[in-house]
Amino acid sequence: MALSANRQQRVAITGMGILCALGGQFDSVLSAMRAGTTGIGPVTRFPTERFHCGIGAELREDAAGAFFNAEQRRRYDRCAQYAIIAADRALQDSCLEPNGALTKGRRVGAALGTCNGGILSLEEQWTVTDLDEQKTARYPFYQQGDDVASYFGLNGPVTTIHTACAASGNAIGFAYDMIRWGHADAMLAGGSDPLSHAVFSGFNVLRALNPVPASPFASRFGLSLGEGAAFVVLEPLDRALQRGANIYAELCGYGLSNDAYHETAPDPEGRGIQAAVAMALRLSGAASSQIGYVNAHGTGTQANDQAEIKGLRRVFGDELGSVPLSSSKAYFGHTLGAAAAIELTTSLYAIRHGLLPATLHYDEPREGCEGLHVIANDMREGRPAYMLNNNSAFGGHNASIVARTGLADDAACDPMPYDANRRIGIVGIGAVLGGETTAAADLPPGACSFSLKAFDASKYERRMNRLCQFSIGAVQTVLDAAGWNDAGDGGGSRDGGGSGDSDNDDPAGKEIGFVYGTARGSTESIGKFLHSVFAGGPEFASSIHFPYTVINSIAGKTAEKLALRGFSSSLSSGGAEGILAAASACGSIRSGVHRRFVIAAGEEWSPLSDRIDRAKGLTDSRYHKLEGSVCLALTAMDDAMGQGLPVIAELKGCGMAYGEYPCSPRTADALKHSIEDALAQAGLAMERIDGVLVDSVGRPGEWEAQQAMIRQRFEGREVPVISLNEQHGFGEAVSSMLLLSTAAEWVRQGKMQMTHILAVSIAVNGNTAAAVVGAVG
């Protein structure tokens, strides 16, 4: 795929699919919304007698039973099942098929957002010790997105975004970027989360649930949990118009941020949501005065609703009182990782029919939510040209999307351009790893003995899990190396409308983007929480460990400790996280999001992670395991040179494509596309590559097959193809980031006279990614 220099690619939503408590077709869902019907009712899937609340928004149809055969139901966790059904409906609605005539020769990828991944596959076993391998293999977060990709035979970029309740908004933004930056011709994007007994137990112990159906912004506090999935099909607007597609909206831009405040509570001043909304407006080219409807996060809890309204007031000022606003969670419950996708798609469908969603069960405004134009109880007529969709999450992550629904309006948005010619430098490397430094501690190869308390006690908290410690230590190191702890302004330069006030305790921290990758998160914390539920009883769920069952909590705690309040995301791919994070950060720098990014990845060992290894066949790997965290500091080369920063290496290009495992011609094709895209973005021919560094799982026969596939790309030219893992071991996300840092160090040192290294990651399920790392000169 040719990657053009300055893309002003506009992106359309041309298909939508849904599965929620009000139904599985948009016309029936809209009919229920018009009637003021809530999907919240008594929970029937598990006992709730010992909880403070016994209601939730369950699906009332057995969609999976009608859609999948028995073997497929055994193969997929319910999270993946819901996602596949909603994605299939979106594809049908768009009239696109991944391998059909309209997509032949084109790259179609997927981005799935989820809060809890395949937790039901552990929950149905009700143990974290004596685990069934087939069921446990369905659990990992990345497995959910990979299952969607495998089911539809997708060949483009694929990732699972796990920023908890902001995940599907984040995933839609990631997919939008893949199209704008030329990595994909179309993307499936959305979210999925089923109702979970264990997760319900966690919210119960936090006293966050409302015993009656939730009423955001009104007098009764508390949320109602829900479940479901929704997906959109994204494609270039010009192509959608050319083929006469059914266009629901133009996706104009999105914003991400982190509160950097607390693992479960929002910044009470609303600065996190303010930053996400302001970024979405700035990057979309829309002014706050153009927003005609706000679909708010609005969970119904006192802290969240007040913080969100404060943040919106910081952006809209006094004008907020005249903007129609509502929360859809009184219809669907809080569907966690699926929330943004469900709420965006139902809003767009309602607007197409001249209606705006309401906030059900609304009586009177609660403190801090007065003076709003809340659409109370009954839908209202309205066809806004632009709408805003907000979601926030545990871990402090926020996502905001700007969509243009009035395509006939001449006042089209003017998104920030993407400058593919902007060069990206690596200006810092930080690592906390196992290996030689742990030998004295009598630990096995690859184990990490790092203690954050010993390294910097001011960042340590009692009972902090090891992965948080590794990650905070590594990121602190890279910030020091890059000289960014006391840095000045690093944000985008264009003054978009509705940017709001900019007060912040740490403006420098706000202007550093942060993308984190982990395949599993803290399995130590997850295992302890699930054990508290399974062994002690759901009513005795651990409030200490519950916040860390969402695996964006590692990125969130790192952001909190190091004041990283800018663009913030967390993703999973089972072994390609490093290059996926690099692609996101490099593209964001080229798009004017921020001028500086930290990308990081990490994994930790635990008894639960050992059992996942066995279930996924990773104990058969030829390599030892690796734990720890690695991170890079990235900035535009011209900024680095202007500030006198020493540049370690240049990150020239990235490419991603989904293959499969075991290795097959499809895997070879995915590697070919990943490598070609990375070279195209770098502006280099294959002849310029001096060596290849590979991060591979190393199961029997895997490395040999992958090495042969890579050598084929050189058409007989002898080039060293080297396994990173022979020396360092394999650790999914952490080894994928170590791949990039090692390539950077090698070209800086001129190792083996290499000036351009092709770094290649092949993940557990065959997801592939490639990057070109070059010497500076």
Image (tube, rainbow, N blue to C red):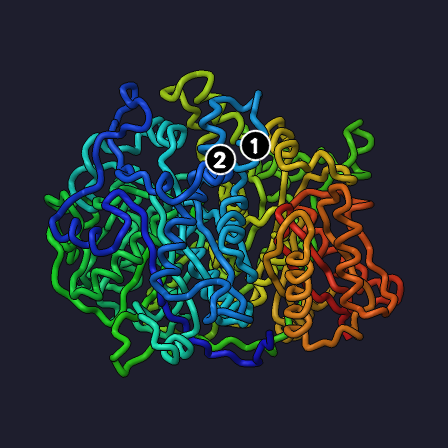
Seen at 57% across and 79% down, the residue is 4
Seen at 61% across and 46% down, the residue is 574
Which residue is under mark 2? 74
Give the answer, above or below, for where 635 lies relative to 632.
below
Q: Nearer the viewer, residue 60 or 597?
A: 60
Which residue is under mark 1? 134
Give the answer, above or below, for where 25 lies relative to 248.
above
- Outermost bottom residue: 410
Seen at 35% across and 42% down, the residue is 66
> Seen in the image, is 129 located left or right of residue 392?
right
Label 2 sits on a secondary structure element that is: helix
Q: Quadrant of residue 450?
A: top right
Q: CA distance from mark 2 to mark 1?
A: 8 Å
The picture places residue 721, in percent across and down from the top left corner, at 82, 58
Given contact means CB atoms under 8 Å apart, are the residues at marks 2 and 1 in contact?
yes
Q: How many marks?
A: 2
The picture places residue 594, in percent across and down from the top left corner, at 51, 66
> Seen in the image, is 526 located left or right of residue 347?
right
The picture places residue 667, in percent across and down from the top left corner, at 66, 56
The picture places residue 645, in percent across and down from the top left corner, at 69, 67
Q: On the rendered image, what quadrant is the N terminus found in?
A: bottom right
The mark closer to the camera, 2 or 1, is: 2
Circle number at residue 560: none
Residue type indicated by callout 2:
Arg
Label 2 crowding class (10 Å Cα cut-off): few <14, some 14-19, many 20+? Answer: few
Label 1 sits on a secondary structure element that is: helix
Q: Nearer the viewer, residue 334 or 485?
A: 334
Q: On the rendered image, what quadrant is the C terminus found in?
A: bottom right
Circle nearer the N terminus (2, 1): 2
Seen at 46% across and 76% down, the residue is 9
Residue type indicated by callout 1:
Gln
